[in-house]
Amino acid sequence: MFPLGTALVPGAELPLRIFEPRYRQMLDDHADTATDPPTIRFGVVLIQRGSEVGGGETRCEVGTLAHAEITGRLPDGRASLTAIGRRRFRVVEWLPDDPYPRARVTVLPEQAPSNSDLARLRTLDERLRELTRQKFTAAGEDPEPILAAYALIDADPRAADLSPMHRWAARTAGQPHDQQRILEADDPAEQLEILEDVMQGMEARVAFGSS
């Protein structure tokens, strides 16, 4: 388990730098070195209170299973990882942190969205694209590379089995609290309500010039 100051939604990418001894040990124990680059799987949970470093923090109970590539590793065990969120889980039991955070978890099922849910999501997507155009045009930059990146995310085969709500949320730089709300919501309609809130916040920030 990897408690962090950010939440990871399925489909989102998360770069990590490993330097604490406990996580260096986790890589030693669980990295699959038969792959190129080496890979590791772990759970990511948001820290409610406390720090990422040193332990003793209070953790959320719903998190995301991550598949990570180890993109660089130094002789002393420090490493760089690129993780991709896959499936949501709920912690059933926290185990002792020695030698690193561990837990028993159960993977959470995903409900299929209705046609009306998907229609609402398409409307949100149109608003996000328009907001992206406004933001980059106002800054004198070309929005097309970002819009093209959205298309690449949609076409990524690794995301084909993910909830469309989670795929959309992975595009946004939402606050950890908002991302956690999305993770904890099981019903697609409830997830959409949260995404609407996130979208409105993004639109307000652009309208008032705070990015």
Image (cartoon, helix red, strand yellow):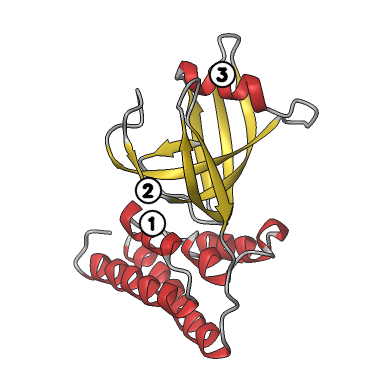
Residue at numbered disc 2:
60
Determine the secondary structure under disc 2.
loop
Can residue 134 be seen here? no
Q: Is residue 125 above or below residue 139?
A: below
Q: Is residue 113 above or below residue 210?
A: below
Residue at numbered disc 3:
25
Give the mark, 1 or 3, whose residue is nearer the N terminus.
Answer: 3
**Residue under the point 55% across and 83% down:** 118
What is the spatial separation of the Cα atoms under label 2 and label 1, in whole angstroms?
9 Å
Task: Give the left or right position of residue 205, taking residue 163 as reference.
Answer: left
Give the mark, 2 or 1, whose residue is nearer the N terminus.
Answer: 2
Give the mark, 3 or 2, whose residue is nearer the N terminus.
Answer: 3
Determine the secondary structure under disc 1.
helix
Amino acid type at image mark 2: Cys
Q: Position of residue 169 (x, y in %)?
A: 47, 64
Residue at numbered disc 1:
180
Residue 47 in which image quadrant:
top left
Q: Position of residue 114 (x, y in %)?
A: 56, 86
What is the spatial separation of the Cα atoms under label 1 and label 3, in whole angstroms?
28 Å
